[in-house]
């Protein structure tokens, strides 16, 4: 991928591990500009929870784009092919042996990463938490992520716009990985918004819907059949969105369905009207900002900021879905669509920083 301010080509390679080990995506980005201020190349990377799902691949793309634009960075991305905390933890630990200048860490099982993250920080490796806040003891003090409670509230509010006034009935809520803070926060935002704004609605769940697409489809199909008169089925995750759209179309449902993220299938269901909307966590933007701040700090010998860098989210519905579909066509398109936000966020970092304890 070429950029006007980057003269050297990008090197990318994909390696697939043997059957006994998880698959790993390796992407190397290098540049000729001064890496660490001493004329060298920075060795950095990102670890994600599931290298095959859209949410993670978008964060990887954003991180790689930031590394390419900065120049002087050899950048590697790792993650298991399925959501597997222990497997990712091992990949993260392996990454620390080469990405000595900094790592961006996204995961869905924070307790597993307390010790590995603390070990990396103890070795002098700057670690930025992405998408999931770090826990006490991890020694990670800078987090880039959404207000996930607000994302859930947005989803409930969009549903209420499409329901009759003073609705009475049930809404079923699902969470792919119960216990994952970002997903639980979204479900809480959904539930509490209905309680405050539509007391006639009874929220059922959140039920476990699984991150594996096939399991997710089966879980939602069971909920739809068990609750045929529900007003809406709302999810917190990636696979929730497109599987709910598929079920509604196949079952010719009259209920509302929606969830989060912008998988290409989800966007098609928003465009067709099967899903009334999706809430986009803007994963590319998050990956870019986390990596850009990390590179800037290391290159300039600064400490990473402390706190929660609160990132925006975007409601995608029929009014803007075509624009988002175009944005998703390539990393270049995502970057150019996001550039105004990137410039504003990086130029006014203190305006977007909140105490880590306020993360939700």
Image (cartoon, grey):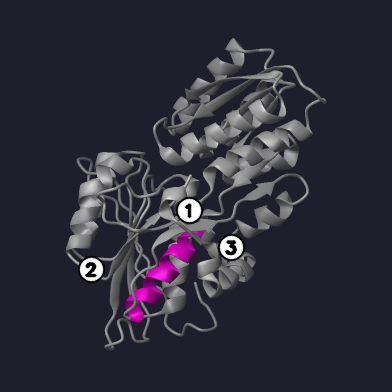
Image position, residue 359 (x, y; %): 46, 48
| Numbered circle sitting on residue 100 | 2
**Label 3: how many residues lie within 10 Å, few (<14), some (14-19) or many (20+)?**
many
| Numbered circle sitting on residue 145 | 1
Image position, residue 131 (x, y; %): 44, 50
Q: Could you give the CA–CA distance between mark 3 and mark 1, rounded to whole angstroms?
A: 18 Å
Q: What segment is highlighted magenta in the picture?
A: 286-300
Please name whichever residue, 41 or 167, is drawn nearer the observer in this view of the structure.
167
Foreground tag (2 vs 1): 1
**Label 1: how many residues lie within 10 Å, few (<14), some (14-19) or many (20+)?**
many
Please identify the quarter of the rendering in which residue 329 is found: bottom right
| 165 relative to 90 in the view: left or right | right
Image position, residue 160 (x, y; %): 74, 31
| Numbered circle sitting on residue 231 | none
**Label 2: how many residues lie within 10 Å, few (<14), some (14-19) or many (20+)?**
some
> Could you tell which of marks 3 and 2 lies nearer the N-terminus?
2
**Does residue 235 sit above or below 201 in this rendering?**
below
Residue 96 is at least partly visible in this image: no
> Could you tell which of marks 2 and 1 lies nearer the N-terminus?
2
**Helix, strand, or loop for circle 2?**
loop
Residue 231 is at least partly visible in this image: yes
| 95 relative to 51 in the view: left or right | left
Report the residue marked by disc 3.
334
Q: Does the magenta stretch include residue 91?
A: no
Foreground tag (3 vs 2): 2
> Could you tell which of marks 3 and 1 lies nearer the N-terminus?
1
Please identify the quarter of the rendering in which residue 72 is found: bottom left
Give me the residue at 22% from left, 46% from top.
18
**Helix, strand, or loop for circle 1?**
strand
Q: Could you give the CA–CA distance between mark 2 and mark 1, rounded to whole angstroms?
A: 23 Å
| 270 relative to 338 in the view: left or right | right
């Amino acid at each position: 991928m070429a950029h006007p301010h980057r003269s050297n080509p990008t090197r990318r390679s994909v390696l697939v591990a043997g059957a006994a080990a998880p698959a790993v995506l390796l992407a190397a980005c290098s540049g000729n500009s001064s890496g660490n201020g001493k004329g060298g190349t920075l060795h950095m990377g990102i670890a994600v929870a599931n290298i095959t799902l859209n949410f993670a691949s978008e964060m990887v793309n954003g991180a790689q784009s930031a590394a390419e634009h900065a120049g002087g960075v050899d950048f590697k991305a790792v993650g298991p092919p399925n959501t597997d905390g222990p497997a990712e933890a091992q990949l993260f630990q392996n990454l620390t042996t080469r990405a000595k200048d900094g790592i961006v860490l996204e995961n869905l099982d924070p307790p597993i990463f307390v010790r590995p993250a603390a070990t990396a920080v103890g070795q002098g490796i700057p670690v930025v938490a992405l998408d999931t806040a770090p826990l006490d003891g991890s020694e990670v003090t800078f987090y880039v992520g959404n207000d996930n409670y607000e994302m859930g509230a947005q989803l409930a509010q969009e549903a209420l716009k499409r329901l009759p006034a003073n609705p009475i009935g049930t809404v079923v809520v699902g969470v792919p990985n119960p216990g994952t803070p970002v997903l639980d926060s979204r479900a809480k935002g959904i539930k509490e918004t209905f309680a405050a704004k539509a007391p006639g609605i009874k929220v059922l769940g959140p039920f476990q819907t699984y991150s594996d697409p096939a399991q997710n489809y089966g879980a939602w199909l069971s909920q739809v059949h068990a609750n045929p008169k529900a007003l809406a089925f709302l999810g917190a995750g990636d696979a929730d969105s497109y599987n709910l759209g598929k079920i509604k179309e196949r079952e010719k449902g009259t209920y509302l369905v929606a969830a989060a993220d912008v998988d290409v299938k989800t966007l098609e269901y928003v465009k067709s009207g099967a899903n009334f909307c999706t809430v986009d966590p803007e994963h590319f933007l998050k990956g870019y900002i986390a990596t850009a701040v990390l590179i800037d700090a290391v290159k300039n010998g600064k400490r990473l900021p402390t706190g929660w860098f609160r990132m925006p989210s975007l409601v995608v519905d029929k009014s803007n879905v075509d624009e988002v579909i175009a944005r998703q066509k390539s990393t270049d398109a995502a970057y150019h669509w996001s550039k105004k936000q990137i410039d504003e966020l990086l130029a006014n970092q203190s305006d977007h920083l909140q105490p880590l304890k306020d993360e939700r």
